């Protein structure tokens, strides 16, 4: 079967769109479909006959997955907005504090001053999560204050379906601080021999390489570990956050797993479904490719097995 072009389809609705296309194709394969056939196929999609036939016409006329996502009974409701709306004065005050202290200041420093400014204005201060997100957004395109190459692991804000339930992918990356280029990536397990060669070939002479100590502990090859400075995993994540900001292209990252939303809560609309590991890998690979292209950097070296994708 030809691969379905999912361009323009929300990733969390890939499964629903594929299901719609499959059922419509089954219907169109019938030589002389009857009204009973229409009803039977509509029931498979929880649609009325009229709604199902609208899908049939869309597919017959356009062969477009994006149009299938926007047709039928459920047109992909917008994500539910947060019931707490941030006061514009509080938002401006927070942006001013981040600009004043710099986005690489600690969240504690930023939060303390934000609370003081908001109290002076007589408005409610944003939550720590909101302030964190604003600081992370400001870090993109900002001098990170980091140097050399940092290797660490973070989560990716995409719900995936695993045998143990819904999880999020765990992404290990080697990032060059000077331009934010991602030199190597793995959705684990990683081939550290390949990683070491990739990092060495992309590093500036005498560039410092720092790697999360838990990753180094997985590798006992002294030749690979030589010249690499081990740092705590949390410090590696913090350094990467200062270099990359909150996302790689359009893919949001998770640097504080204990404070992140539960994966199930990322599914906010009726048609949302967790991604397959293969779909998640495709999205992450494409995001990293766009991220590097924007920096005139070569493609990242993928240093794991193509089928490996573990949850964070």
Image: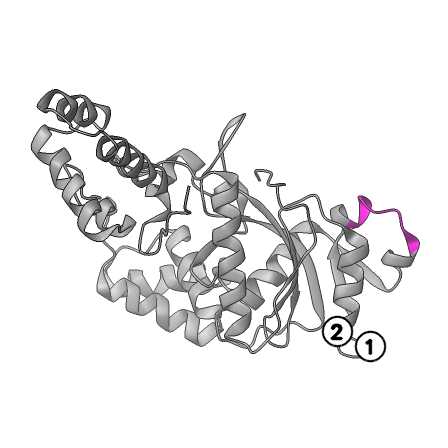
Tell me the residue that label 1 is attached to. 206
What segment is highlighted magenta in the picture? 216-222
- Relative depth, front residue between 301 and 210: 301
Which of the 4 image quadrants contains residue 185? bottom right
Depicted 226 relative to depicted 177: above or below: above
Pinpoint residue 80: horizontal percent, then vertical percent: 23, 44
Label 1: few (<14), some or many (≥20) within 10 Å? few
Marking on residue 203: 2
The answer to whether 293 is drawn above or below residue 53 in the figure is below
Q: Residues within 10 Å of mark 2 (few under 14, many from 20)?
A: some
Quadrant where the N terminus sits is: top left
Asked if residue 279 lies in the magenta stretch, the reply is no
**Residue under the image location 18 percent in, 38 percent down:** 74
Query: Magenta segment: does it hold 217?
Result: yes
Decide: is 175 above or below 68.
below
Q: Position of 3 compared to 50: left or right? A: right
Query: Which residue is at a point 52% across and 43% down the rendered structure image?
Result: 278
Label 1 residue SS? loop
Q: Position of residue 159 (x, y in %)?
A: 44, 40
The answer to whether 186 appears left or right of 71 in the picture is right
Instruction: Single out the residue that lies furthest toward the right.
Output: 222
- The quarter in which the C terminus is drawn is top right
Q: Quadrant of residue 269?
A: top left
Q: CA distance from mark 2 to mark 1?
A: 8 Å
Q: Does residue 173 lie above or below 72 as drawn?
A: below
Q: Is residue 200 left or right of residue 41?
A: right
> CB atoms at circles 2 and 1 under 8 Å apart?
no
């Amino acid at each position: 079967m030809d691969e379905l072009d999912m361009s323009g389809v929300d990733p969390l609705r890939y499964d629903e769109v594929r299901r719609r296309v499959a059922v419509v194709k089954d219907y169109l394969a019938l030589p002389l479909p009857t009204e009973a056939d229409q009803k039977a196929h509509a029931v498979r999609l929880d649609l009325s006959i009229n709604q199902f036939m609208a899908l049939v016409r869309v597919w017959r006329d356009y062969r477009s997955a994006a149009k299938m996502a926007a047709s039928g009974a459920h047109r992909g409701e917008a994500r539910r907005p947060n019931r707490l709306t941030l006061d514009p004065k509080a938002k401006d005050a927070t942006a001013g504090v981040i600009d004043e202290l710099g986005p690489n200041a600690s969240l504690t420093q930023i939060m303390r001053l934000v609370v003081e400014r908001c109290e002076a204005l007589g408005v409610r201060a944003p939550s720590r999560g909101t302030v964190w997100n604003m600081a992370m957004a400001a870090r993109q395109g900002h001098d990170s204050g980091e140097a050399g190459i940092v290797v660490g692991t973070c989560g990716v804000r995409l719900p995936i379906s695993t045998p143990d339930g819904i999880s999020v992918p765990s992404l290990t990356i080697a990032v060059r601080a000077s331009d934010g280029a991602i030199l190597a990536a793995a959705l684990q397990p990683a081939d550290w021999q390949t990683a070491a060669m990739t990092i060495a070939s992309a590093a500036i002479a005498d560039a410092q390489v720092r790697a999360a100590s838990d990753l180094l502990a997985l590798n006992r090859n002294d030749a690979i570990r030589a010249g690499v400075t081990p740092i705590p995993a949390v410090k590696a994540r913090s350094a990467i956050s200062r270099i990359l900001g909150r996302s790689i292209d359009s893919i949001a990252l998770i640097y504080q797993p204990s404070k992140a939303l539960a994966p199930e809560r990322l599914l906010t609309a009726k048609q949302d479904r967790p991604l397959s590991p293969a779909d998640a890998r495709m999205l992450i690979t494409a995001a990293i490719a766009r991220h590097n292209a924007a920096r005139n950097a070569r493609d990242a070296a993928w240093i794991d097995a193509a089928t490996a994708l573990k949850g964070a």
